[in-house]
Amino acid sequence: MTIINNALSGAIAAQAALNAASQNVANLQTPGYTRQGVLLAAIAPGSGTRQAGNGVEVSSLLRISDAYKTQQMWRANAEQGRYATTQPYLTQLEQVMGDDKSSLSYGVDNFFKALNAVGEEPTSAPLRGQVVAQAGALAESFNSIYQVTRNQQLSVQQQRDAIVPKFNTLTQNIAALNTRIVAASATGTNVSSLIDERDMAIDSLSQLAALEVLEQPDGSRAVSLKSGQPLVVGNQAASLGIDTSGGTPQMQVTFARSVYGVDDTAVGGQIGGLGTFEKNVLQPLQDSIVSMASQLATRINDQLGAGTDSAGNPGKPMFAINGGGGGGILSVSAGYSADDLALSADGTPGDSANLQMLVDIKNQTITLGSVGTVILGDADTQLVGKLAIDSQQNKSLLNTATTIRQQSEDDWAATSGVNRDEEAMNLVEFQNMYQANMKVIAVANSLFDATLAMFG
């Protein structure tokens, strides 16, 4: 009987909808779960009949998702990862270089204060000794700050080295999920959970680098860096690596036997943040610190060489300029003593003409790569000021990226997330639908029994 068939199809459709709702409720707290639903369609009657129809069918199982909102969430994740990974380094540099007792300004000021003090009595051994002591403290200030930058370079390299295996594991997982999704889709299997798993892998990957993701007709997804290098195509995954054979580390992507060079400052995500910080902030700052120390030491040594010490001998270099590494960048020359200070210009004990020239060095200009031409006494202030600007700008961008990421997550959840109230309504509605169709079947059975009874 058509009435029974119609009601049975309605009960089956209601049961399918209840199953989808129950799955949604069960995954109410599951991270990355995309809610599901059923698409119902009326079954038309056969041609030439005067029937109302042949019931209802579940034409498809829906995965309720908005591709634009998902892409927006991934883009926001890359921006947040970029600025979040940079901020701890900037904060540390800002705190160390801006500290009243550990800054370069503190060491420079104390050294020139000691030179000014000895001007009151150029022959005083304690005052001359204080100049040498402050010279050692000045060298230690430069070496200490320089070592902080070297430690950060090492930390950046170690963090990048730790990211690369994670990056490659994620690309391999995405490629493997592509394979499973394509195979399962071909057999008509529901692949919503596999797509959720793949989306979460892409989301994790987007934190490491900015991505371009394209949906393919077969259900797979092609993933590439925003600069164009392929990462995942179908079941093939690229491998990210760092080539050190040329001396300077070069990031590269290897895909299908092809090797693509990658500019890590343009990659975005955590990798891009580390590359940008290292090349655009840390390296220029380190070069400026080395240059400042070198120019200061050279001018002090040259001026001392133009004078004479307490015994009338030509002045010796006070500072030794080192090549960095474990020995630092600056030190007081071995064996240098207070008697070696060449403060006199004419060889007369007590003359301080050369001392005045030494004191005036603080007011001379030097040229640093990151801040340009500045007065030596103000050089550290300029460096710290630029660092503070970079840090504040990064904080602002991080706050913006964090807000955008949160908004994009909320937008995604509004479409794809499970709403408890909505699912409760669905359960009630489809339960009523199921019960109504079962009532129709009961009525149909009563009519059938009554018809049989008429024929005795």
Image: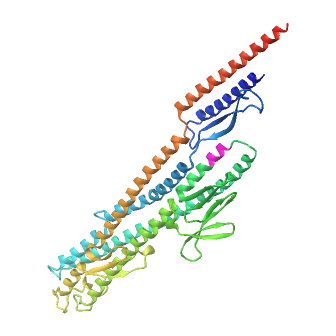
Q: How is the image coloured?
A: rainbow
Task: Report the residue that reaches farthest toward the top.
Answer: 456
Q: Does 205 sit above or below residue 136?
A: above
Q: What percent of the width, then of the height, locates residue 335?
A: 33, 82
Asked if residue 370 is positioned above or below residue 94 in the image, the reply reads below
Instruction: State the residue in front, 21 or 40.
Output: 40
Q: Is residue 185 magenta?
A: no
The residue nearer to you, when weighing 123 against 117, is 117
Query: 169 or 406, which is in the foreground?
Result: 406
Which quadrant is home to the N terminus?
Answer: top right
Rendered location of residue 346, percent (x, y): 18, 92
Q: Residue 422's spot in the image, x, y percent? A: 54, 32
**Is 454 above or below relative to 112?**
above
Residue 441 % position (x, y):
72, 19
Quadrant in which the C terminus is drawn? top right
* Residue that lies at the very extreme toward the left in this rendered image: 120
Q: Residue at x 43, y 79 (%)?
A: 323
**Magenta stretch in the rendered image:** 191-197
Which of the 4 quarters of the picture holds residue 304? bottom left
